[in-house]
Image (cartoon, coloured by chain):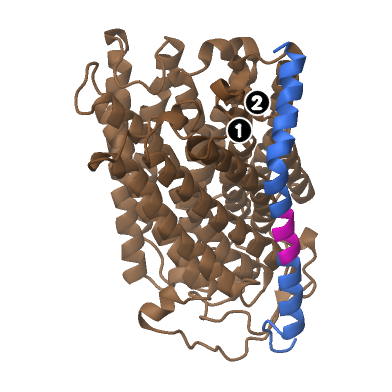
Chain colours: A brown, B blue
Amino acid sequence: MSTATLTHGHDHDHAPTGWRRWLLSTNHKDIGTLYLIFALVMLFLGGASAMLIRAELFMPGLQLLQPDLYNNLVTNHALIMIFGAVMPAAAGLANWMIPLMIGAPDMALPRMNNLSFWILPAAALMLLLSFVVPFFPGGGSQINTGWTLYPPLSLQVGMSMDFLIFAIHLLGISSVLASINIIVTILNMRAPGMSLLKMPIFVWTWLVTAFLLILVVPVLAGGVTMLLFDRHFGTSFFNAAGGGDPVLFQHLFWFFGHPEVYILILPSMGVLASIVPTFARKPLFGYHSLVGAMIAIASIGMVVWAHHQYTIGMSLGAVKYFMIGTIIISIPVGLMIFNYIATMWRGAMSFETPMLFAVAILLMFTFGGLTGVMLAVVPADLQYQDSMFVVAHFHYVLLPGAVFGLFAGVFYWLPKWTGHMYDEKLARIFFWVNVISFNVTFFPQHFLGLAGMPRRIVDYNAMFTEFNVVSSIGAFVFGLSHLLLLYIVVKTVRGGRKAEAKVWEGADGLEWQLPSPPPFHSWTTAPQVR
Amino acid sequence: MGEQGINDALRRKNIRVAWVLAGFVLLILISAVPFWRGLFRLMTAASGG
């Protein structure tokens, strides 16, 4: 970790006021805040659809939802959570923290930063419209494809699919612009003396993530554009009747979709790299190996996409390649986990809320990774595929690996952002309720899947009732627990004990040398990194 | 350690790198269609499809 000397000159603290401050903002902190607020709103929308899904699955038989609406909700839950909640929240952390961590006065392209954010509400509107348009006269059928949008089903859906494709284009443009900005900021705007290998790991994770995004998002954009052409302009990329093949879309989709998992996870792993050394009061173990592991995860993660498609009838050679490649990824992922554990080893640990989340993430994400290795094995996957086991697996990967990491980051940096300490007691209650109810929700789904319950179905055999009841009760508690998160955040923003510049005793890095909250224009004087 | 801001030289450098990256994105976008169709044909041929 780097150390710095600084002379803090005068603060040019001329923050604009009113709506102009937010709509026309080019300030990385304000745009970071906008991203985080947007993500929180979308988290509640995506969470509401998840709770409706679990309410329907509480008992066998049709309870609340018709099958079409159920499928619509399954689709919108995934798309809202991935594109609306997790990615913008991670971008919010990046906007807030990267310039502070590398000693830059702002992002490299501040106006483009504004554009990246303000495309998002328009995209979200398109996304939400795609789910509600079918309820209007002439709106066509509901989207029933799931987030994967596989043809031929996606060729048959009504106009709501066009809204969705347009939303994906907008979301893609936003992500690519934000990624370019992040890469340029990291490459060009570092403080004197901060070489690439002195950057905090959180910045490294974002550099790798941003490169991943610009490599895979255009492929998704190409894929959905081909889908649009098949739907409206007479092409047959994916239409078997015209000589195309729907499986081609699966390859295009998963070339984006699998790296997307790492896009969601890596920033949270970067957050852990800040939190664990702080609360273990030890330097991060194996900095260079962590950087290498991240690059390995990103590189290998880009060439193993077809493990999502084992059952489509690939050649034996292709299947073996994708299986072995997928299992190999567990090596750099395991390395990251072991680095964090080694950082804790013999540390003077304390367990404030960010550290509680960090420990929980290491346990639960590892569990999700282990079921991932099970799913990577082809003969086993032929049994597990499209079952609730897969649902349990990816929620164990994405909730601890991405969402809990973001929660940990929010608790870790909230005092820095607001200048107030959050209510530690309430935060710990939130942690325990959140983590326990998460496990109550998703652990039983492993058994449901192994017993043969398929995913993405509105009704199920009565033999699956008990585990579904438990899972739904867990889901209601889990969903409602986020109201407590909202309360804690609002309470902290409004007031609380004053936070010092260096909020945490063991914290290290440039961001802790600025006051809490940092001035509107921070690092107006470049720090010298030794 | 002087006043830090985005001066003209740095601004130009930032925009130059951004354009290079944008060109890279465009290249991937445009090459995606023929690349994936070709790879797909190769894979289906290998599986006897």
Which stretch appears magenta?
B19-24
Q: Residue A146's x, y, as percent?
A: 43, 31
Name the residue rendered at 56%, 44% in the picture: A264
Chain of the residue under the numbered disc 1 shown in the image = A
Give the residue number, with chain letter if any, for mark 2. A306
Q: Quadrant of residue A78?
A: top left
Badge 2 crowding class, 10 Å Cα cut-off, few under 14, some 14 to 19, many 20 or more, is: many
- Residue that appears at 50% across and 32% down: A148
Whichever of callouts 1 and 2 sits on the residue coming sooner in the sequence is 1
Q: Residue furthest left?
A: A63
Residue at image mark 1: A254
What's the residue type where badge 2 is placed?
Answer: Ala
Q: Determine whether label 1 and label 2 are within 8 Å by CB.
A: yes
Quarter location, residue A447: top left
Amino acid marked by disc 1? Trp
Few, some or many C-alpha atoms within 10 Å of disc 1 (few <14, some 14-19, many ≥20)?
many
